[in-house]
Image: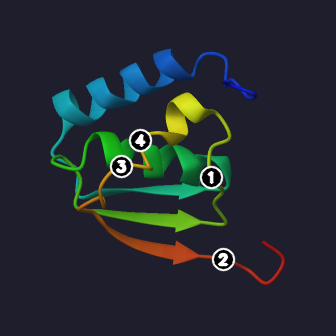
Amino acid sequence: KRIFEYVGSEETFMKLEKLVVEEGPWDGVLGFSQGAAVAAILCAKLSTHLSCAVLIGGLVARDSSLRRHLDKEPIDVQTLLVCGKQD
């Protein structure tokens, strides 16, 4: 059951995936706050196209249709997680 749904997220990820695949190669991604959640999911979906990620003050997506990408096997992307005392 989906309690939270991020409206428009499917289209957003389709565009981001297309950008990474068609305009790459990319070394990695950087995300802050909600962007860190997006970057983490992008790494899970495109681990063969990204080698690293910097996730700053991130959170876990509440939408279960997106979070499921993170609940699979370990993601083969090196990450730097930056959290503050109040995060």
Residues 45 and 11: in front is 45
Q: Which residue is mark 3?
A: 72
Between marks 3 and 1, how big is the CA–CA gap?
14 Å
> At label 1, which amino acid type do we have?
Val
Residues 8 and 19: in front is 8
Between marks 3 and 4, how big is the CA–CA gap?
6 Å
Q: Which residue is mark 1?
A: 60
For mark 1, does the 10 Å Cα neighbourhood hold few (<14), some (14 to 19), or many (20 or more) residues? Answer: some
| Mark 2: secondary structure | loop
User: Which label was assigned to residue 83?
Assistant: 2
> At label 2, which amino acid type do we have?
Cys
Q: Quadrant of the N terminus?
A: top right
> At label 4, which amino acid type do we have?
His
Task: Give above or below for 84 relative to 55.
Answer: below
Tell me what residue is drawn at x 67 percent, y 17 percent. Answer: 7
Q: Earlier in the sequence, mark 4 or mark 2?
A: 4
| Mark 3: secondary structure | loop
Between marks 3 and 2, how big is the CA–CA gap?
23 Å
Q: Which residue is mark 4?
A: 69
Between marks 4 and 2, how big is the CA–CA gap?
22 Å
Toward the right, the furthest residue is 86
The image quarter containing residue 61 is top right
